[in-house]
Amino acid sequence: MKTRTIIASLVLMLMAQVANAQDNAEALIRILVNQMKSHKNVEMTYQYQINNSDVTTAPETGKGWLQGNAYKVEMVEQEIVSDGTTIWTYLIDDGEVMISNAEDGTDNTPLKLLTSLDENYAATLTTIDSQGNATIELANPKGQYRRVTLRANVSKLAINSLDVYIDDGTKLIVTMQEMKFDQELGDDFFTFDTKKHPKVDIIDMR
């Protein structure tokens, strides 16, 4: 109850100070990130679209899981899995899996990006309404993902969507559909099992 009271107070404060709200926006991002980190793991179902040169792809459905430094992302054309030390990028149509060190990555994936927004991005609140629906612009000129437009309901601590601007000019549009917390996941959930893909070509980039 105390946490909800703090959030309600923050919403009212933000509504009153939208014109000068960079510090408040960063506080809000910390609350959203800490909410996700407070759980053992997070499971997300989402729709995603890619916008490149003014052409937007049809919506596709994906799933993602975050657990500490480990993550897994399933999309139509590829799967990305990391146990926090190693990253496996499986290109489904090509029948290839690329193996790399997690420490060589930048933001890794747009969903993994969610847990580092408070560390790597400068935040500015642009709008917020009486129901707590907020739009926050985040910038990291040196990152793989240069800019992120995040839409969230701060009164519910719920992220609604992300527009992620990649350094090559592509925009990834991610719309959250469902979030689940504290799922029971197997010990090998965040690894790529080559036995299940015996014909895959392995490209070790480590």
Image (cartoon, grey):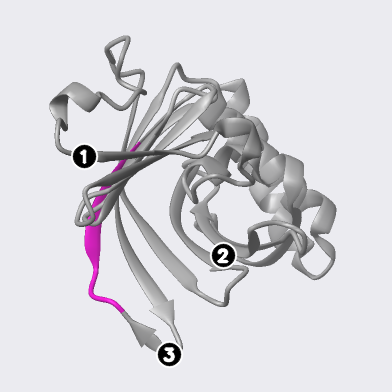
Which residue shows up at 36% across the image and 59% down it?
Answer: 175
Q: Choose the circle earlier in sequence order: 1 or 2.
A: 2
How far apart are the alpha carbons under marks 1 and 2? 50 Å
Q: Are marks 1 and 3 in contact (CB under 8 Å)?
A: no
Q: Secondary structure at mark 1?
A: loop
Q: Residues within 10 Å of mark 2 (few under 14, many from 20)?
A: few
Magenta-tinted stretch: 57-64
In the visual, does 198 lie left or right of 21? left
Q: Secondary structure at mark 3?
A: loop
Q: Nearer the viewer, residue 46 or 13?
A: 46
Give how far across and how far down residue 146 sits, in percent: 67, 64
How far apart are the alpha carbons under marks 3 and 2? 30 Å
- Whether 67 is drawn above or below 18: the answer is above
Residue 6: quadrant of the picture: top right
Q: Please, what is the three-letter code of the amino acid marked with disc 1?
A: Val
Q: In the rendered image, which residue does mark 3 sit on? A: 54
Closest to the camera, between mark 1 and mark 3, is 1
Give how far across and how far down residue 190 sits, in percent: 36, 23
Q: Nearer the viewer, residue 170 or 183?
A: 170
Q: Residues within 10 Å of mark 1 (few under 14, many from 20)?
A: some
Q: Please, what is the three-letter code of the amino acid marked with disc 3?
A: Asp
Which residue shows up at 78% across the image and 50% down it?
Answer: 24
Give how far across and how far down residue 25 sits, in percent: 73, 53
Q: Please, what is the three-letter code of the amino acid marked with disc 2?
A: Asp
In the picture, the quarter occupied by the N terminus is top right
Q: Choose the circle earlier in sequence order: 1 or 3.
A: 3
Q: In the rendered image, which residue does mark 2 sit on? A: 129
